[in-house]
Structure formats: structure tokens, C-alpha cells
Image (tube, rainbow, N blue to C red):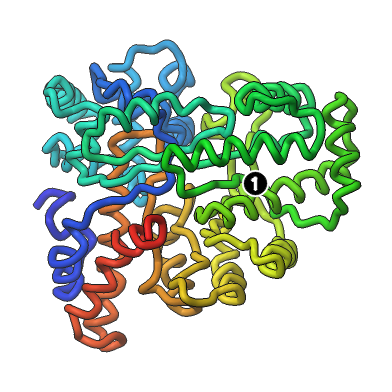
Amino acid sequence: MPFINDDFLLTTKAARELYHGYAENMPIIDYHCHLPPAEIAADQRWENIAQVWLGGDHYKWRQMRSNGIDERLITGDASWHDKFLAFAETMEVLLKNPLFDWSHLELARYFGVTDRLSRKTAEKIWKKCNAALAKPSFSAQGLMKKSNVKVVCTTDDPVDSLVHHIAIAKKPFGTKILPAWRSDKASKVEDLKAWNDWMDRLSKAAKMPVKTWDDFLEAMAKRHAFFAKCGCVISDYGVTEIFAEPYTEAEVRRIFKKARGGKALAPEEALKLKSAWLYEGLAADAKAGWAAQLHYCCLRNANTKMFKRLGPDTGFDCIGEWNVAESLARLFDRLEMNDALPRTILYSLNPKDNEMLATLMGSFQHGPEKGRMQLGAAWWFLDQKDGMRKQLEALGALGCLGNFVGMLTDSRSFLSYTRHEYFRRILCQMLGKEIEAGELPRDIPWIGSLVKGICYENANRYFFG
């Protein structure tokens, strides 16, 4: 039997019934990813498997480095063929790493390849995948259709023109491509030149001067409205820690003016400005009826030498450790007191925070919305079997698992939709095992209906009413 088969990860009868009867054929809402809208609009095609697999995947780059592969064969000028061989060699030592499972799922689902990828099988797999990629259906849009993807939310800067989203909306192809608001650059005041350059871009996008804090809020409101007009229903904030320092409006106006004038801020000033940015952003999301995402606890660019050489998002980030319970509670409490707390999905890159987040969000739930506050899916380094199980267990023990909005890809690859399958199999295996052990009722139709909700229906309700 091949490694990837119909019952991959499903070891009980109940698990198989749940997956094949309820989860397997549900559509996908991929509400957080990093796919380039330009490539979707152009219906991107690829000449070979390495381009679509290795072109921007820092998950794979990290493990290739761990296997002693020279950087030339990772991000350098080596041929795509040689890079593919280097990854195939790395696969031989990747057992238990999620890349091993994901990669073989992708080979099986998209290319019909069930052989284990290794140096020995690499040439045969290279040729078979490349032949498939030459077919008309193997394009960016074609792969979304093949994966039964109904909605994709990309990650977009407030100053973006959204020209590609507009173009896609004029020529729909069956998958909705919506922008998601990611305003992090407005908070990165440590690099004053880059920050001021971004403010100049905001001024141009909003068609108004941005010299004061009030100008900034007005310009952001204009861009927020433009994103909403283009279908945006979700924001995303990628932060190291949660910013919730007390401040006054007078302080923020003074600090913003100082930074706009090119004068470096003291650490406490920067924190107040970041806190005001985060509060006002979330309040704007609530007013617009959007859901918000908070991603935190990533220690970025830990390797300065390689950051200078290759730039961000190239595989040199790691799990961070900040205690945020008090600041997160303070932020949410202030928003709630002002009726300005949006529906929010919380993600920590540190698994120690699962239970804390699950209990904190419970303090801010209320009707009539189900699951107003969400414990986000296992993210980045945690979207592997153990990380997913821990997130599901924490939510099940301390919240309402049946209201969970489910998985996302968080990926730059058009082949990553098998991560939804991976999650669904893990979910069904976990529930099925407990059914067989007598820890859950043997009521497959009822539990199956909850599985369908977690796989698709809850996200559809949460984001689109």
C-alpha cells in the first residue's frame, strides 16, 4: 500500500466514516495566505515542479540547510533541476517533519505520484510532474478549481492599488479572491526612513497629505473603505508582542509629529504609537464589520548575516516568547468598553499560549454571534500533527470546538491546499479515536455535522454571514 492512500492517518472505523462521509469533499475557504494576487490575475504557469515547489518556500529552504545543502542549491543560481534533486535528497531524512507528509500529499493529489520522493526516484518524479504542469489545467487558477477552493483572502498593504483584485473580479473564474488588510508597516517606526517612505505612499494612495496623527487616521479610513469596496472582510496584524501601553491623544499626536519629522523615538514613545495604531486599527475593523486576526510571538530575522544577504521571509525566523496575557486583556477590555472589539482570531507562534488564549477569549464572547472570539489554527511552525492536536485539544477543553473556523494555508504556494486535507484527517482521527474509546458518543451524523462546520461552514458564516 502506498504511503499516501485513502485512509492516510485514519486508523479507526469512526475516523474513516467522519473523514470520507463528512470532511473529504467540503469546499475550502482559505482566509489567510500569502499568494501573490498578480500571479492569480495572470493565471501563472510553471515550467517545472521546482519552480512551484521551491520558488519561495522557506519551510523547505530551512530543512535543506539543515541537511547541509549549499545555499546555491536553495536560493542561489543553481538550475531548478539541481535544486529539486537537493530537496529530494533532503526528503530522505525528513521523516516526522510535516514537509514529508505535505510533499507526498501534493505529489499524490496533483500529480498522481505515490512513490516516495528520494534521490533514487527524483528523476522519474521530475519528469512526471513536469509533464502534468504542461497541461492547461495546471495553472494558478486551475489548481484552485482542482482543490475546490471557494474563497482566498490574500495579504495586502493598505497602500496597494488592488489592481489585480479588481482585474480578477472583472473576469471571475469560480474562486473569489479577496484582499485582506495588513497595515504592519504603519507601526514599524524603528526604521524611520522606511516608515516615512511608507507614510508618503499612504499619502499618495489616499490622495491627501499625511503630516499629523489625525491625517493618518483619515487616510487609513479612506483606504479601509476602498478595501471594503473591493470585498475585504478581514484584517491581519503581525506583531512580535501585543501593544497595549496607555497613552493620551495629545501624546500620540506629539509622537507622530516627531517621527514624521525624522526624529528617532524613545522606546516608550514607539510603544505608545504602536499601541494607538493597533487600537485604532481594530476599532476600524469592528466599525466595518470585519473580522481581525492577531498573529504574534514570532522572533523574526534571528540570523543577521543571512537577513542582510537574503532579506526577510527566507527561513531565519523562530518561535518567540513574550508574556502577553495582561496586555491582550487590557487591549480587548478597552475596545469592549467602547463597543469597538471586532470578531477576532488569535494566533500565537508559541504553543504555551494555547490555554491562555482559549480562556482569555472566553472572557469576551457574547451573543448573538457564535464563536465571536476564535483560537486560531496551529500556525507556521505549529501546523504539524502535534501542533494541530494541541490547538484542537485546548479549544475542545476550554471553548466550543464545534464553532471553530478551521484551517488555512498561510502559504505562498498554489499546491498548499492539501494542508486543509491534512488538518481534516487529523481532526477526524482525533474524534474517531475518542469515539472508539467511548470518550465521545457513537453518533456519527451529529459529530459529522460538527466536522463539516469546522471544515467549511463555520468560516463561511463567520466571514460572510
List x then y, in percent, for residue 229: 46, 39
Q: What residue type is disc 1 on?
A: Val
Numbered circles on residues, count:
1
List x then y, in percent, for residue 36: 41, 29
Q: Is residue 294 left or right of residue 54?
A: right
Q: Nearer the viewer, residue 395 or 179?
A: 179
Q: Is residue 341 above or below residue 155?
A: below
Q: Is residue 142 visible?
A: yes
Q: Residue lying at the far left in this picture: please name it.
A: 1
Q: Which residue is mark 1?
A: 239
Q: Is residue 349 left or right of residue 262?
A: left
Q: Residue at x 64, y 44 (%)?
A: 299
Q: Residue at x 48, y 72 (%)?
A: 394
List x then y, in percent, for residue 278: 69, 49
Quadrant in the picture for residue 191 = top right
Q: Is residue 302 visible?
A: no
Q: Nearer the viewer, residue 113 or 448?
A: 448
Name the element at disc 1.
loop
Q: Residue at x 14, y 28 (%)?
A: 137
Q: Is residue 238 left or right of residue 455?
A: right
Classed neighbour count for the residue bearing mark 1: other residues with Cα under 10 Å, few (<14), some (14–19), many (≥20): some
Q: Residue at x 50, y 25 (%)?
A: 161
Question: Where is the C terminus found, in terms of image quarters?
Answer: bottom left
List x then y, in percent, for residue 109: 17, 42
Q: Nearer the viewer, residue 119 or 166?
A: 166
Q: Is residue 320 above or below residue 183?
A: below
